[in-house]
Each structure stands twice: as C-alpha cells, then as structure tokens.
Image (spheres, grey):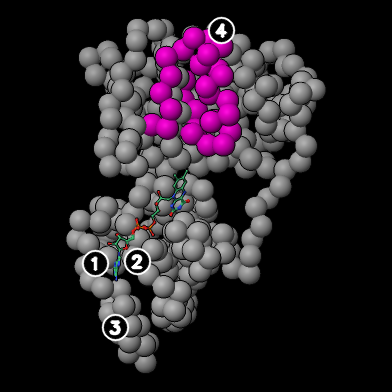
Amino acid sequence: MNEILVLAEHREGELRDVTFEMLGKARELGEASGQAVTALLLGSGLGDMAETVKPHADEVLVLDHGNLKQFNSAVYQPVLADAIKTREPGLVMIGHTAFGVDLAPSLAVALELPFAADCIDLAVEGGTTKATRQIYEGKVNATVSFVDAPTVLVTFRPSAFPVEEAARAGKVTELTIDVPEEPAVRKFLEYVEAAVGDVDITKAEVVVSIGRGLREEENLPMVEELAESLGGVVACSRPVVDAGWLPKDRQVGSSGKTVKPKLYLAIGISGQFQHLSGMKSAETIVAINKDPKAPIFSAADYGIVGDLTKVVPALKEKIAELRA
Ligand SMILES: Cc1cc2nc3c(=O)[nH]c(=O)nc-3n(C[C@H](O)[C@H](O)[C@H](O)COP(=O)(O)OP(=O)(O)OC[C@H]3O[C@@H](n4cnc5c(N)ncnc54)[C@H](O)[C@@H]3O)c2cc1C
C-alpha cells in the first residue's frame, strides 16, 4: 500500500522514455501521498540499466533472467503478478505501449485488479485515486475512479508526462522469482526494426509536417521547399500517408514515429492526440491552420491562423530574405 510500482520498459538494450515519464509522475504522487517509488526492471543482460533508473526511484527491483531476454507477455505476466502479490503496491504503472497493451489487461484479470488503460493523468484526492482518460478522439477528458481495492493498475500514454531530472538514491534489490519458459503456443521469433527510408525524421532538428489541410499532392513541393530553406525534413500526419502523398516512414504519431526536433512546424494539421503524442516533446512548435479553434494551437508555442497556401510561400520568402 505504501508503494507505487513502475514497470521499467526497455527495448533493444535501451530504457524507453515512458519509464522516466511514469517515474516522474510516481514521485509527484508519492510526495503527495507518502508513498515510496519503486521501479521494476525485468529482462536479461540488463547491464547498467539499474544504475540509470536509480536516481528516479527509492528502490529498483531487478530480475535478470535468461527467460526474460525478449518481451513475451506470457512470461512477463506471471513474474509481474508474483512481484505485485509480494510487494502489495497501492498503484502499478505500466506504459500504454505495444508492450503494456499486451501485458496489462491479462495482468488485471489474473489478479482481479481495478484497471484503467491509456490514461494521461492521475491524481489522489482525499484518498481516492482518479485517472484521466481521453474519449471521443481526444475531444473530452473523462475522470475515472476505481472500486475499493488494495492495488490499482493503470497504463499511461507515452509523452503524457515530461521526463524530469531526479536525484533519489534508489536502493537496488535483486529479486528471486521463478521465471517460466516461453510457452510453445507463443514464442518470440525475431525483432524487426521498422524500415527507415531515405530520410530519418527522428534524427532531424527541423521537421516540417503537413496534414490533410494540404488538400492535394500538387501542393507538396511548396512545403518541401520550405523544409529545404530551413534545413529540415518533411513529415506528415496519417491522412497524408493514407492518401499516398508520402511514405509511412514520414508519419508522426502514435502509429508512426516519435520526433523531438528543435523546431516542429505543423501545417494543416488539426492536432488529434494520435498526432500530438508523436511530436509534443519538440522544443518549439509552430502551427499553421486556417481554423483558430484547431486543437494544435493548444500544443503550439506559436500559431499562425491562415490559409497554408498563402502562409507557406510567404514564410519561405521571408526566410530567404533573412538568409540573404
Ligand atoms: C489507432 C489510430 C492511430 C492513429 N495514428 C495516427 C498517427 O500516428 N499519426 C497521425 O497523424 N494520425 C493518426 N491517427 C489519425 C488521427 O486520429 C487523425 O485522424 C489525424 O491525425 C488527422 O490528421 P490531420 O490533422 O492531417 O487531418 P484533419 O484532422 O482533417 O485536419 C486537417 C486540418 O487542416 C486544416 N486546414 C484545412 N485546409 C487548410 C488550409 N488551406 N490552410 C491551413 N489549414 C487548413 C483544418 O482546419 C484542419 O485543422 C490515428 C488514428 C487511429 C484511430
């Protein structure tokens, strides 16, 4: 009850941002409610991951076992269930990632835990835990409360919280839990990295992103020229990929890539949460949209209300002028 347990997520030897995002939220909740923050690190050949996590938690539970080499929820779930039964945390936090989506529901069923998925916030008010989830494609935030239980389980949308600096001195504890073999019906075969095309939008410092507001493919060169004048790359929202104007590896968002450039220009993009989750950590966001009520303006540092076919050429001209 006196503990918040955060499942650390890593892929191909690297801890994922969602781990530190959740640990930051856990520290905030823990400070308000007097609960300690514990990170649970499962895997094989974890190297110095526990050292990296230590400053972010009061305790880091580590289970380094050959059967945990690759993520397989059929193996991870009973291990996690065992840790939860032993530790009895008040709250278990898991990322709402491909990994968490696979793992959390069956864990909730196995342990009969109250469960809220894909949350963007959590608060404890007067001893009651309340989670915030988005519904109706992000147009409405719903508050969810839980039935009384010693432990509740919540998955959190990546990028819901910032990654904060931390300076705790987490104690590292090695766990001894029986780890099952992969069952024959569900085996890990291979890890396949999504193809990176001729341009890797995740590495660019300037990303000029276009959405359905572009209206037709013929308008694409105008945006490409703007990107070139800024030394950036062109990315897009999903409808642009669906229309076949740009390849899938240029898509930003929950089913595309996550980018963190210095500058993100969102042009003719409404700002649905599936898109925002892939770009909201950009240092500076500039939105161009003809609708002043477009949700993208809430995420933007600077907004230009106007028709992109007029604003983009004007911007390009101004940049050329400044460069000259
Ligand atoms: C499971 C799932 C996963 C998804 N994954 C992703 C994802 O990874 N990435 C993603 O982007 N989406 C994703 N989506 C789709 C997402 O829900 C939205 O539909 C999508 O982001 C909308 O793209 P958009 O903003 O380009 O288009 P729209 O929502 O149609 O917005 C177009 C915008 O252009 C503006 N506009 C129109 N004409 C002009 C003009 N002349 N000048 C200026 N502005 C103009 C409009 O005002 C509007 O705001 C996903 C959806 C689901 C269900």
Q: Amino acid at mark 2?
A: Gly
Q: Is tag 2's residue or tag 3's residue first in the polypeptide sequence?
A: 2
Give residue 143's position: percent from left, percent from top. 27, 26
Q: Nearer the viewer, mark 1 or mark 4?
A: 1
Q: Which residues are magenta?
A: 92-119
Which disc is residue 314 wearing? 3
Task: Between label 2 and label 3, give the one nearer the viewer.
Answer: 2
Mark pair 1, 2: CA separation: 9 Å
Identify the secondary structure beneath mark 1: loop
Which residue is depicted at the point 38% across and 63% down? 212
Does residue 253 belong to the magenta stretch?
no
Which residue is denoted by mark 1 in the rendering?
290
The amino acid at mark 1 is: Lys
* Residue 48 seen by the camera: yes
- What residue would you read off at disc 4? 86
**Label 4 packing within 10 angstroms: few (<14), some (14-19), many (20+):** few
Which mark is drawn over residue 25? none
Query: Residue flagged by tag 3: what amino acid is it?
Result: Ala
